[in-house]
Each structure stands twice: as C-alpha cells, then as structure tokens.
Amino acid sequence: MNTALNKKTMVLISLVLITATAFQFISVNTKYFDYAMSIRAPKLTVMLITAFCIGSASIVFQTLINNVIVTPCLLGMNSLYILIHTLVVFALGSGSMLVTNKNISFAIDLALMISASMLIYGLLFKKTKGNILYILLSGTVMATMFTSITSTLQRVMDPNEFATLQNALVASFHKVNSGIILFAAVLILLVIYLLRRELALLDIIQLGKDQAINLGVDYDRVVRKLLLGVTVFISIATAMVGPISFLGLIIANLSRQMFKTYRHSYLIAGATLTGMAVLLAGQTLIEHVFNFNINIGVFINTGGGLYFMYLLLKSRRTSR
C-alpha cells in the first residue's frame, strides 16, 4: 500500500514541477529574462506557501470536525480579514499608510486575525469544555456578524474609497509582496515545530475522542492547540493573498479521494501538492490565456461551489 501511495505522491510532485516550470518560463522574452524572473519568482513562492497553508489546515480541520465537507473558512477568518480592511479604509481612507504600505497591512492583518482566533477560540474551547461543534457554530455566527458590519460600513462609504477597497478584497497573485515571504515562511516553520507532537497524533485523533483518550491522548489539549494552528495557517494565507474560500474544500477532498488512507502524512502532502498544481495552472491560464481579465478567485469559487454540491449529493446517495 505504501508503494502505491508513494507513487501517487511522486505523480503529484511531477505535476507541480511541470506547472511551476510552465508558470515560470512560458512566454519569457530572453531579453528581459531577469526582470521576468524577479516578478514571477515571488508569485511562485507565494502560491506554494498559500497552497501549503490552506491544504494542511483543511485536512487537519476536517479531521478535528470529523466531516469532509467543511473548511476552515467557517471559523470566520475570511470575514474578519474583509472587516479589518473595511474598517481601516472607512476610518483612515485608502491613502492611509496602513493601506498603502503592504508590509504594515500584512502585519496588522496577521496580528489581528491570530489574536482574535486565540482569544475567541481559546476561550470558547474552555467554556464549551472542548465541544468542537459549538466552536464551529460560533465561528459561523461570528462570520455572519463580521459580514453584516462590513456590509453596513461599505454602504455608507465614499464610492471612490469603496472601489479601492474592493480591489484589495479580491484574492490575487498579480501583485504579491515579496517582503513578507521570509517572515511568513519562518512563522509557518515555527508553528510546525511547536505543534510537532500534536500533528503526530492526528491519526489517533481521527478515531474519535473516546478512543483517543483510551490510547492515552490528552484529547482536549491536542485539539485546542491544533485548532489554533489551523487558524494561524489560514490567517497567514489570507493575509498574503486575500480570502480563497473554496480552495481548501477542493484540494482536501481531492487528496482524500486520491489517497484512500488514514495516514495524515500522505493526506496533507496530497492536499498541499494538489493546491500548488491548481494555483499554478490557474494563474498560468489567467496570465497567458485570459490576459489578466479575470481573477483566480473566480475559478476557485465557481469550481468550489460546484464541487461542494457534488459532495453533498454524493454523501446523500451514500447515506441511503
């Protein structure tokens, strides 16, 4: 079985290398090769980081919830990101340094989303005695509240400010901030290091709370730390490129269909590599076929919505 899983992993790695090569070198004028690489290399790196964060976070989150048709966006991080940007533009204007300076904007987004997640979900976990479904429901309610506040502010906002804001709220790889790449990578490695023991217990956590406790796992502590890790990863990805709601749903379930195994090392690798291939192929099409006329979020959200309906219909047929 391991041989088959390793082969599938190698196929995905090959697919990522092919799509990465196509994105990096297609239609490059040799006269401006260095300039083209200086633009495309940061985009490539950000796409790889984004796919890793969303793919791994989605697999872990689905295991914690024990449901394969949920995504971490239900925790409300996307809605909080939109609210933060709306508040800044509404209060200070689109010409504020907090908006125009991408490094400061990234730092504010990341700090507020991580702080809010630790405060809200850490507190909720204690209050609900580790009931993950209450936390999921609370996240959905808070996302609705964030969206309502955002909608109210945008209705009374100056039309010119609103137009500027809309451009910033769409997930895009057109103009990535290369200055945040190293910081994001270091933070990701730090989170992985701090959660290395909890990540190693995912295969056991998947068995359920009672079975995990019987096997000697401090279930509530492990789940709480992993949930916070998920929110940090989603916060990093969202702060880098904007909200991509359905990407996690697509790549996590494709990984589960390809790697029919309980071993999370393969599932996370599959979701991550699939996400990389999807983003790289999609961005290549947008730049060289559609000439930047549409955004990658359109592809992902449309495809993700259709895929979500497919999963619902599939689960309904299976339950009969």
Image (tube, helix red, strand yellow):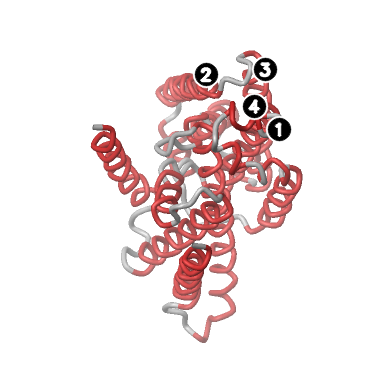
Q: Residue at x 65, y 40 (%)?
A: 97
| Labels 1 and 4: the sequence-earlier one | 4
Mark 4 vs mark 2: in front: 2
Q: Amino acid at mark 3?
A: Lys
The C terminus is located in which quarter? top left
Q: Disc 1 or 2, which lies upstream in sequence?
A: 2
The reply to whether discs 4 and 2 touch (Cβ–Cβ < 8 Å) is no
Q: Amino acid at mark 2?
A: Tyr
Disc 1 to disc 4: CB gap under 8 Å: no
Instruction: Work out how far the residue at label 4 is from the one at label 3, CA to CA, in angstroms.
Output: 15 Å
- How packed mark 3 is, by other alpha carbons closer than 10 Å (few <14, some 14-19, many 20 or more), is few
Q: Is the residue under label 2 in contact with that under label 3 (CB below 8 Å)? A: no
What whole-number distance in Å separates the C-alpha atoms at marks 1 and 3? 21 Å
Residue at 57%, 75% in the rendered image: 35
Mark 3 sits on what residue?
A: 126
* Mark 1, secondary structure of its residue: loop
In the image, 296: left or right of 136?
left
Label 4 belongs to which residue? 116
